[in-house]
Image (spheres, helix red, strand yellow):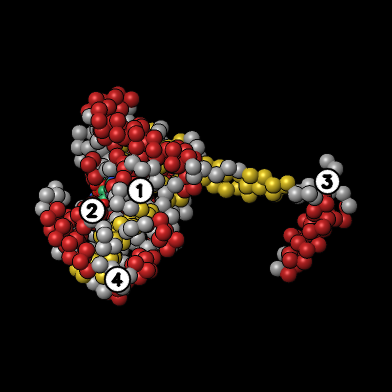
Amino acid sequence: MIAKVTRDELTKRKRLESRHPKEEQVVREIIQSVREQGDSALYRLTEQFDGVRLSALQVTPEEIDDAWSQVEEDFVQALKEAAERIRSYHEKQKRNSWFEPAEDGTILGQLVRPLTRVGVYVPGGKAAYPSTVLMNVIPAFVAGVPEIVMVTPPLPDGTVYAPTLVAAYIAGVHTVYKVGGAQAIAALAYGTETIKQVDKIVGPGNIYVALAKQAVYGQVDIDSIAGPSDVTVIADEKANPAYVAADLLAQAEHDPLASAILLTPSSRLAEQVVVELKRQLDSLERKEIAARSLRDRGAICITQDLNEAFAIANQIAPEHLELLIESPWDWIHQVKNAGAVFLGQYSPEAVGDYFAGPNHVLPTEGTARFFSGLGVDSFVKRVSVVAYSREALFRDGPKVMTLAHAEGLGAHAASISIRLETGKVGEWD
Ligand SMILES: NC(=O)c1ccc[n+]([C@@H]2O[C@H](COP(=O)([O-])OP(=O)(O)OC[C@H]3O[C@@H](n4cnc5c(N)ncnc54)[C@H](O)[C@@H]3O)[C@@H](O)[C@H]2O)c1
Ligand SMILES: N[C@H](CO)Cc1c[nH]c[nH+]1
Ligand SMILES: [Zn+2]
């Protein structure tokens, strides 16, 4: 059910193969049609792939009212509270513009400016997680993005899945369009009569969506393409095996390709976790998916000690790292590569998925080695500011000219010398 593997076997595991030539061709053709035919391609492709003949792409206020009437009050309440937590956590990520005057009168600084328009992709129907809508939209909202639009495929009756619409409204989306797949990504990247071009596209989707995002990267910015989710749990001999098993299963139920790994120096705990996994698996709704994930991508590795467990975890660079060990704060300095770290027995990953506040859109497949999760920084740009004084230009100018001449760039040097030669920096002096 879940393999016991050695350190070598674990760290040699291959990344998933990701070549899709047939789908890449389909996506190229879809993008081309949207660029050439705009809205009419969106209506035609929505009929072809979603089986819906739409009369308008934009969701109306009546449709939003209707969605509110379809969802349970406790769901709305929990979603609103989660949104508040996420908002307040992301507020702390905000950076201010800064300006630093020097004694010579020069001012250097940095403007922080939000993107102007962001597009959020949300998968169709129940494939969409309302929590993921919050996690994608709220950081953009907090960053100050003035226009956040959402695209999502319509249901067979031409409406949008109600929990998705309600989550979009709570998170702060301005406009929702009923279009999905590669055609939605193309519309956001190039613009059509109805959908304006955006600066950045975020949000998960199927292979057509992922390939389309890759194809339009450069025309617009995109978030990193999400691979299957993963968790690594480091547990010591005192950890509760039922908690460890529950947390491994919570990840495994996402996807047969999700990966759940336990690193522990205690072989007794490892045996107990295997027993617990079998016991808890049986009662899960998504038992088939979780069982396949554990069988194909799960692992238990007995380490020499906790130091070795941390060394392996850093090699894995997990999306989520749980520390179910005594005094986890004493070990935090050992964490180098992870999307998010959860400390102690009361911090199961699920609280981070929904409610704690940090973003659950995190780097997968070992990319936590060099990527961070989605956040306010993902939706702002830095503009550097240079305001040299006369004194500074006369002091630094000759050195700038030396460097420019060394690169064979005479016009660069001349733009300095012309100022130095006049002895006067400008008409305003
Ligand atoms: N947090 C997350 O990371 C997260 C959350 C939810 C869902 N997901 C992922 O989102 C995906 C949801 O997939 P989905 O398919 O249900 O919804 P989706 O919205 O990603 O894709 C549906 C669209 O795919 C297009 N499509 C379908 N078949 C096609 C074909 N043969 N040729 C061209 N286009 C085609 C259609 O335009 C359709 O509207 C899954 O891969 C799931 O793993 C991830
Ligand atoms: N664990 C997923 C990837 O971080 C996020 C999620 C959404 N809903 C439940 N879980
Ligand atoms: Zn999850």
Q: CA distance from mark 3 to mark 2?
A: 71 Å
Asked whether 11 or 108 is in front, the reply is 11
Q: Is residue 209 above or below residue 315?
A: above
Residue 248 - label: none
Q: Residue 356 is drawn in which quadrant?
A: top left
- Count of numbered circles on the image: 4
Q: Residue at 26% x, 33% y: name it.
A: 75
Residue matched to label 2: 243
Which is nearer the N-term, disc 1 or disc 2?
A: 2
Q: Please report contact status of discs 1 and 4: CB closer than 8 Å, yes or no.
A: no
Sort mark 4 into few (<14), some (14-19) or many (20+) by Cα contacts within 10 Å.
many
Q: Residue 238 is drawn in which quadrant?
A: bottom left
Q: Residue at 32% x, 49% y: name it.
A: 347
Which is nearer the N-term, disc 1 or disc 4?
A: 4
Q: Residue at 20% x, 66% y: name it.
A: 268
Residue matched to label 4: 303
Q: Residue 336, percent across and down? A: 43, 62
Residue matched to label 3: 426
Q: Residue 291, percent across and down? A: 15, 58
